[in-house]
Amino acid sequence: MSDIFIALAHRYEQGEIQSIPAVVDHILQGLVASASLPITYQVSIKGQVYEILPPAANLTFLMDTAVPYVEAVFFRGTPFPGTISYNAQAYQVPIFQSDFAYGALYADPLPIGSSGIPPTLLMQDMRHYLPKALLERYQQGLRQESDIRIKICETFQQSMFCVTTAAIQGLAPHPLSTNNLDEQKANRRYLENWMNRFLKSRLLQVNL
């Protein structure tokens, strides 16, 4: 994914990317181009090679790494310790696994620095590498840099919604531009399932 984002940054700097649909399309094309790339990994210890992810497993980028990552990190995740109660009587954790949703697209931006709050670590790290244009945009806000970690987290969530949108489009059963009625109905059923999962996400808050 890093290659896709680096190329996106270059295209933005050159003025080729000027809208959110253009961002989503760039990511989609990158996912499609990398979809069948093999995922392998091996380590060498004292001259002995150990295949952790062997070629024989036939793992590919899109279906075996990108899609599970989106599902696990963006949509599921784990409620951060200290943010909700794990006491069953408090009913703050869903009863059914299918309703469990507290991934990156749902997480509140909590810059409290507590252990086990991933967004805090992300915000703290990213603040050292902000591009000049993004920092200037943050400084235009009412609080300027005093709430910069909140702004970074919301920006990150916006970018992850773009990635998720690209993945959803790429995995649709039929081209979204199809004029075939049956294919349109199949696409609608597919998209309705995804849209229902966005209802409790931070989609509206980060796009105000």
Image: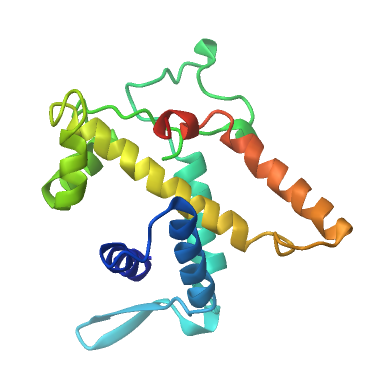
Image quadrant holding the C terminus, namely: top left
> In this picture, is 190 found above or below 12?
above
Please tell me which residue is depicted at 77% across the width and 63% down the height of the picture.
Answer: 178
Image quadrant holding the N terminus, namely: bottom left
Where does the image place residue 9, in percent across and percent down from the top left?
29, 63
Q: Is residue 156 left or right of residue 182?
A: left
Q: Quadrant of residue 94?
A: top right
> In this picture, is 102 found above or below 65?
above
Please tell me which residue is depicted at 28% across the width and 27% down the height of the picture.
Answer: 110
Please tell me which residue is depicted at 34% across the width and 27% down the height of the picture.
Answer: 81
Residue furthest top in the image: 89
Residue furthest right in the image: 182
Where does the image place residue 44, in percent across and percent down from the top left?
25, 82
> In this picture, is 69 found above or below 31?
above
Q: Can the viewer see residue 118? A: no
Q: Is residue 97 left or right of residue 113?
A: right
Please tell me which residue is depicted at 83% across the width and 51% down the height of the picture.
Answer: 185
Q: Is residue 186 left or right of residue 46?
A: right
Q: Tag count in the figure?
A: 0
